[in-house]
Amino acid sequence: MKYSRKRTWIQAAAFALQNGYIKGWLHGSIATGATKKICTPGLNCYSCPGALFSCPIGALQAVLSNASFRFSLYVFGFLGLTGTLFGRLVCGFLCPFGFLQDLLYKIPLFKKKKGLPLPRRFRFLRYLMLLLVLALPLLTATENGAGEPWFCAFICPAGTLLGGVPLVSFHASLREAAGLRFAVKLAVLFCILLLSVKYYRPFCGYLCPLGALYGLLQPVSVYQIHLDTEKCIRCGACQTACGMDIRVWEQPNSPDCIRCLKCVHACPTDALSAGFRPIGKPVQPRAEKTAPACRLRIPAAILALLPLLFSLRPFLSVLYGVCSGAYADGLLFLRDGAPYCFSAAVGVLYCFFALQLIRKRGNPRKAGLSCLIFTFGGLLLSGLAELLLCALIQSGAGAVDVFLAFVKDMWPVFAAAGAAGGLCLLP
């Protein structure tokens, strides 16, 4: 069996696994079982009638827009660990909407093109989309104090195709309620689907915020495409096979790469291989000169400040409450304000030590990987401090009981952080 056909079967199996709620497809209902508490690594709408899991982008916006200023460590830990381990391998094999784009591209219509007729710098639009996904739920708020999950509400083509269209077709009440917003989403979906017939994965290359997040982690991920420079003859066969039109011999682990691995199988000299590398072993160097350290240290330092951002936001709300007289009662401040202050203190201390570590690491790629691991660790410590102190103050239970209950509820976070820390300590 050809590799492309094997990959198609893997994608189809992943699609069926993530959207296997048959009753939902038959009756237009949404699954509400325990599996909906688990995020799928690819872009798959929570409201899809067949969806058995949650969409990571939808979950991310939901926790960022939470009016109580809390966020789910599980969502951040899951996305961060997935990207650190696999990079965009998820895009190439597990993403349902990516699979649908691949099928559309196989339709024998139009002359096929790899990329939109735009300068390559327009691929950075997906990073702008990721920034808006993170910022708008934090900065905007509705009348009830919660932010708007704007990407799901106005843009997400996967949500429109797999969730909106089936539900509207099943329920007359939804058809009556569908207004201008749904019409805009249908127009966005139609444009992306039409472009996907002629151009290879336009949404993945230019707009997908999930692909942008995994792409940021791809250069330092554990799963890598390795290039043997002695075997490489620069024949261009890898670029010809690559749907994203990447010069693989120059940048085998480009953030644009969806890791479909077609280049590996197309190489006539077997110069390319893919697999997991030990953490202590550096990434296979490029054929050209390596990037200067500052190019990776600056984004590493920015990432290291994320826990401080999330821990200071509730602290600033408490400070506003103190200034406005909302915490005139000392017991009220101890119950509501102290945990946030303690969380902010943990975030500040973490950022200080993380930045010191990044500054002292001579290898920029080691600094980047250390930053990723410490970022997830900082999120975990900050949230753990806040939640434990909240539980101790608001309940009469002992510290051991509270801690055990917290571990029971948050075991996926501890598992992700433990795995990341263990990988970081490997020689």
Image (cartoon, rainbow, N blue to C red):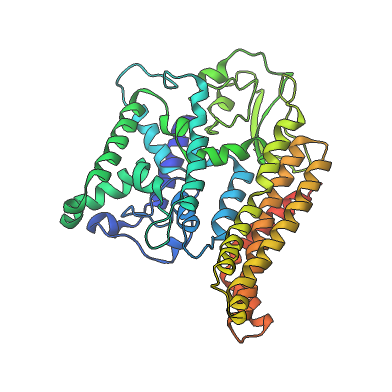
The residue depicted at 62 percent of the width and 58 percent of the height is: 312
Q: Which image quarter: residue 49?
A: bottom left
256 or 4: nearer the eye? Answer: 256
Q: From this view, report whether residue 245 is shown above or below residue 48.
A: above
271 or 143: nearer the eye? Answer: 143
379 or 236: nearer the eye? Answer: 379
Residue 370 in picture, x, y percent from top left: 74, 46
Residue 289 in picture, x, y percent from top left: 75, 20
Q: Is residue 155 left or right of residue 228?
A: left
Q: From this view, report whether residue 89 is shown above or below residue 387.
A: above
Residue 93 seen by the camera: no
Q: Which image quarter: residue 410?
A: bottom right
Residue 255 in picture, x, y percent from top left: 58, 32
Residue placed furthest toward the front: 324
Q: Is residue 389 left or right of residue 244?
A: right
Residue 335 in picture, x, y percent from top left: 59, 77
Residue 397 seen by the camera: yes
Q: Is residue 172 left or right of residue 135?
A: left
Q: Is residue 281 left or right of residue 378?
A: right
The residue depicted at 65 percent of the width and 74 percent of the height is: 389
180 or 406: nearer the eye? Answer: 180
- Total numbered labels placed on residues in the image: 0
Q: From this view, report whether residue 92 is shown above or below residue 176.
A: above
